[in-house]
Amino acid sequence: MQPKNIKRLLRALSRQGLDVTYYQHTYSVRLANSPDAPVAEVLLPEGFPIEAKALKQLANLANVRHPAGGCVCRACATPDFHPGDAGVAIGSVVETEGQVIPSALGSDINCGMRLHVADLTIDEFLAKRHQFVELMKGDYFFGTRDVTMTAGAMRALFEDGVPGWLDAMLDHPTGSVVKSDLHQLTQESDGFANAFGQRIFLGGSMDGSWKLAPPELVPDDGLVRDGGLATIGSGNHFVEVQRVDRVENRALAHIWGVREGQITFMIHSGSRNVGKYIGGMWRDRAKATWPKGLKYPDAQIFPLSTHSHPELVTSYLQAEATAANYGFVNRLLLAELLRLRLREVYGDVAAPLVYDLPHNITLPQVEDMEMLYATSAQSQINKWVTRKGACPAYAGQPVIIPGSMGAYSYLMVGRGNPAFCYSASHGAGRARSRFELNRRGALQTEAELGLTGVDCITLRKERRIEEAPAAYKPIESVIDVQVNAEIIDVVARLSPVLTFKA
């Protein structure tokens, strides 16, 4: 069924220089003046608005090529697709050959999701909610957390991610980690805990280098007190307490340790200031290496080519991996602070990890996770997939898709669909900008903003308005259209209890 007024919409987009067609929930787009560029596809639920700015950003991204060699092979976008502030639409997935595009990823490197379950009922949790919340506010907002590390542990973190950091902690635990269950952390880092494999995507480890990290975080010796580590961040990042509302795939849920009625803890954060440091540096470096005398690309998106600067491509991927390793450990420590407070308030609660995965990352272009784990395949790769606000969704892989703080979130399983670059959405997608909500949201009622009954823990009142449920598209439609397209399947549905927003 075609959307209403589709012909009028397509004519309007054509006047903006876009060649757009529509078929079965999928818009195909490219720049009208670039007929040789690949056609980018956007999967959207019926009734969702199509934003010309986001379409133009995706078409520009699909058109990126380096004059020395290197091009975009494919581009698509997930149903939470919406304009990005830096010229690249959120929800974009781009496959490149012979080039990487630092600005296609931006600065929020390895932003991602982490999910834990706990054998607490909702009544048991709420009975001590106030005590738990006050302790977590101290850790998340007032700096009572202690994530002090040795210089050696920080270097290991940047080099090897979770396994490197954990080895250093086993040798010399520091900060609040001295109270952690290091055996549990080791099992979650190393173990094959479910039918899919490890509990952390890529084991929480990429090929980083401490030499590419911010210098102040990797001194020669002594202790490091990093004010950014174990912090949630701004924007749509959060830590949320949820309840397993419904299980759809009981076999997989059982294997993954998920049961109806459990309390869950979902964490959405990334590499914080480390990602900003590395992302900004390499965006500028890619621009600086553009061939002298050649006109800049109209979209101001600058790739790095393996043909002209193979050493820079290698260095960028290692720098991105360095920030990604930090992101994995940042989410782990946010979760570990929470688990320590859970035990303090509720007793011996294990709260095991279900899964941790990125949705802002550049990875080798492969067809399944087994190939992704094979280092020999990665060393010979000349094709990459950059996902900006999109989850990897390989066959059998857990996928975590949050709703707003007033809507359901979903634990899914990937189906490995090549038509959408083995990718799924990372949320519902914004319907209204933060600027608009800051300007007009204060004039709306709680009911109009969707905030009735929402338990949001924040120190800034404007954060409730900026991130109000009314700011987001309906998550159910986003999930349904991807299930129907055979991208993902539902394992469990989670309902929000309370949300921490920095």
Image (tube, grey):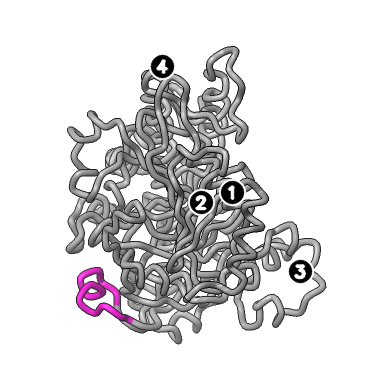
Whether residue 189 is situated above or below residue 489 in the rendered picture = above
Q: Secondary structure at mark 1?
A: strand
Comparing labels 3 and 1, the label whose residue is closer to the camera: 1
464 horizontally vs 4: left or right = right
Q: To which residue does mark 3 refer?
A: 441
Q: To which residue does mark 2 refer?
A: 29
Q: Secondary structure at mark 2?
A: strand
Mark 1 and mark 4 residues within 8 Å of each other at the beta carbon = no
Which residue: 76% across, 79% down? 445
Whether residue 360 is situated above or below residue 461 in the rendered picture = above
- Mark 4: amino acid: Ser
Visible in this render: residue 218?
A: no
Q: To which residue does mark 4 refer?
A: 308
Mark 2 and mark 4 residues within 8 Å of each other at the beta carbon = no
| Label 4 neighbour load within 10 Å: few <14, some 14-19, many 20+ | some
| Label 1 neighbour load within 10 Å: few <14, some 14-19, many 20+ | many
Q: Which residues are magenta?
A: 247-258
The alpha-carbon separation of the residues under discs 1 and 4 comes to 31 Å
Q: Earlier in the sequence, mark 3 or mark 2?
A: 2
Q: To which residue does mark 1 refer?
A: 18
- Mark 2: amino acid: Val
Counting from the top left corner in percent of width and height, residue 497 is at 51, 77
Which residue: 20% across, 60% down? 196
Q: Earlier in the sequence, mark 2 or mark 4?
A: 2
The alpha-carbon separation of the residues under discs 3 and 2 comes to 33 Å
Quadrant of the image occupied by residue 297: top right
- Mark 3: amino acid: Gly
The alpha-carbon separation of the residues under discs 4 and 3 comes to 49 Å
Q: Earlier in the sequence, mark 4 or mark 3?
A: 4
